[in-house]
Image (cartoon, coloured by chain):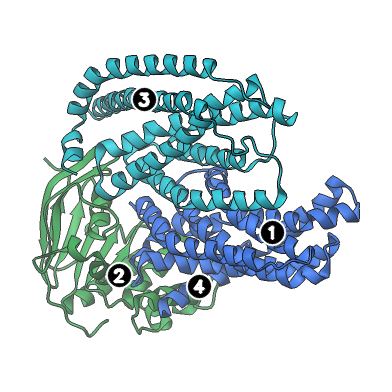
Amino acid sequence: MANLHWLANPGRFLRIAAVVLPWLAAATAVLLAVGLWLALRAPQDATQGAPAKIMYMHVPSAILSMTIFGAMAFASAIALIWRHPLADIAAKASAAIGAGFTASCLITGSLWGRPSWGTFWVWDARLTSELILFFIYLGYIAIWQAIEDPQRASRAAAIVALAGSVNLPIIHYSVVWWNTLHQPPGLMQGRTDPSMAVPLLTLMGAFFLFYVTLLLWRMEREIVGRKIRQFRLLRAQA
Amino acid sequence: MTAATFAATFEARGLTCIRGERVVFENLAFSVAPGGALLLRGANGTGKSSLLRICAGFLQPAGGELRWNAAPVAGDLDAHRARLAYVGHLDAVKPAFTVAENVAFWLKLSGAGTRAETALSALGLGHLASLPAAYLSAGQRRRLNLARLAGSAAPLWLLDEPTSSLDDASSHALLTLIEAHRAGGGMAVIATHQDLALTKAETLRIGAQ
Amino acid sequence: MNVFGAIVARDTRLALRQGGGSYWTLLFFVLTVTMFPLGVGPDLALLSRIGAGVLWVTALLAAMLSLDRMFQADFEDGSLELLSLAPLPLELTVLAKAAAHWLTTGLPVTVLAPLLALMLAVDPAAFPVLMLAMLIGTPILSLIGSIGAALTVGIRRGGVLLSLLVMPLYVPALIFGVLAVQAALDGLTPRPHLLLLGADFLVALAITPWLAAAALRLNLE
């Protein structure tokens, strides 16, 4: 906690972010390039052929979409309980990125589905869970937009994130349960070739760095945006 | 009205209120002794209502603290809520209920054993008891809301413009109620625009430089 | 408990009085179910297959559309402030209001469900399971719904936002509820689905009071 409190000062955060961001962005670009190159060179899937390479975008997107929601709920809990000023900014900044990864997961899943199922959408358990996760992200973003005062909006949004995080495992489980009883085909039927693991892990790392870079950048903008807001309020009062 | 006697002090130290990123008031202090009354005066927007809402525990002060018998109120908000009766701008009247049903519900919640009829007649609403509250005028709705006080056993009354839309006779009935409450050691903090004829009431001007 | 009961009784009576909206919710439920045969055609074989799903989705909509009743009117007329001062933790006040909401929407919907199932050509042998599932599942709708209702209470025209927040969280109740009926129709045991529905209810019961009360405190400031 001591570390968190030290970072709680938005001014200090801005100074650190300014130093770290260019390096993070460069590392993201390098890792992304390496990962994509590895993915293109990886052996083709025996049954699905080239379209199966969409997996290298689809799987990291799916994992990030859920990780970010977890991070968002964690930050929300800290914001709600300890009123930590950076935690709610981090939660808010994460939401749109998480929604983006969820959308990317849905789009790549549907593109991958076209050659393997012959249709763009099948009510596959993972895709259906992702779709509902996407709706929860949208609800979270909507409540930020609905409440003008950032202090109040942050607390309301934190409640939404916490309600979502408690229900998300249940939703995922219920969808899997529903799916096994109806049994449409899944995208990946338990084949994990070791030659796929290295590019997949590299891309996962790249996506994660991408998230951290975007997060810091968006937090920076949010802090500056709030300062501008306060200046304007002061001027309106004077 | 109530036979109970209270002996407690209610005080504020260094209260600061921030609403919507705007500082409403800063470093406010007051003290109310048993049987005391504090009138909050000030122009619109100076934070009279906000101060009452802080006193009622709806709003957290951005700085300073409230004390009840020298103990910080924030330490046990539930106990604090139990010892106050709050009358805000809104009348909390359900048009679908009768006048008696309306007041009976709030009396039941407060745990006071007062009968609805007794409370209503204190504000001259006794004859309307069985009428649906939908038929009441603004002044009558106000009196219906204030009738809760007649049955209240709470030592601290927080009243926000209680005499607005009341005629002289009703205002007088309310003042009688407040004086009886104070005579038993009760306290009242009242935000008002009018001069209320209360004996030995202190006045706190908010927003006056 | 006395105060808890008083709040449940008051909210129930308000919902049943003129303009309270409980009857409208039921009428909405019946009307919307009626739209489905008109939309998909009168084929009884098809209707009997989708019947359970139609009833559950409609029950979900009916519960959701009546959620604004839970806190909105009390917020607007100042009653919510006074309720929060009552000698009852706000967490329990939320439960009392959710209970009253269920008594005036979920329970009547459950009672009406077999009648509408009959019109959708659902096999009457599954009616006991249908009612049992709704009896366990509709309280979830009121509980989780109270979080959304508490969050949107101060937001003007928050009704659509409320649906957006609440509907994804209704997914487990919908899935387990429909699967229980489907199992009964297929001659299988509905037990596992009902147990999962019960577990979902317990989770909702455990988290709702805290989150909804926190949201109400926020809106009472």
Which residue does the numbered mark 3 point to in the structure image? A209
Same chain? Circles 1 and 4: yes
Tell whether label 2 touches label 3 (CB within 8 Å).
no
According to the image, label 1 marks what residue?
A: C179
Q: CA distance from mark 1 to mark 4?
A: 32 Å
**Which residue is identified by label 2?**
B174
- Secondary structure under tag 3 reads helix
Chain A, chosen colour in render? cyan
Q: Label 3 near label 1: C-beta < 8 Å?
A: no
The N terminus of chain B, quarter of image: bottom left
Neighbours of disc 4 within 10 Å: few (<14), some (14-19), many (20+):
many
Taking C66 as reference, is C153 left or right?
Answer: left
The reply to the same-chain question for discs 4 and 2 is no
Name the chain letter of the residue that bears numbered label 3: A
Q: Amino acid at mark 3?
A: Leu
Chain coloured green in this rendering: B
Q: Nearer the viewer, mark 1 or mark 4?
A: 1
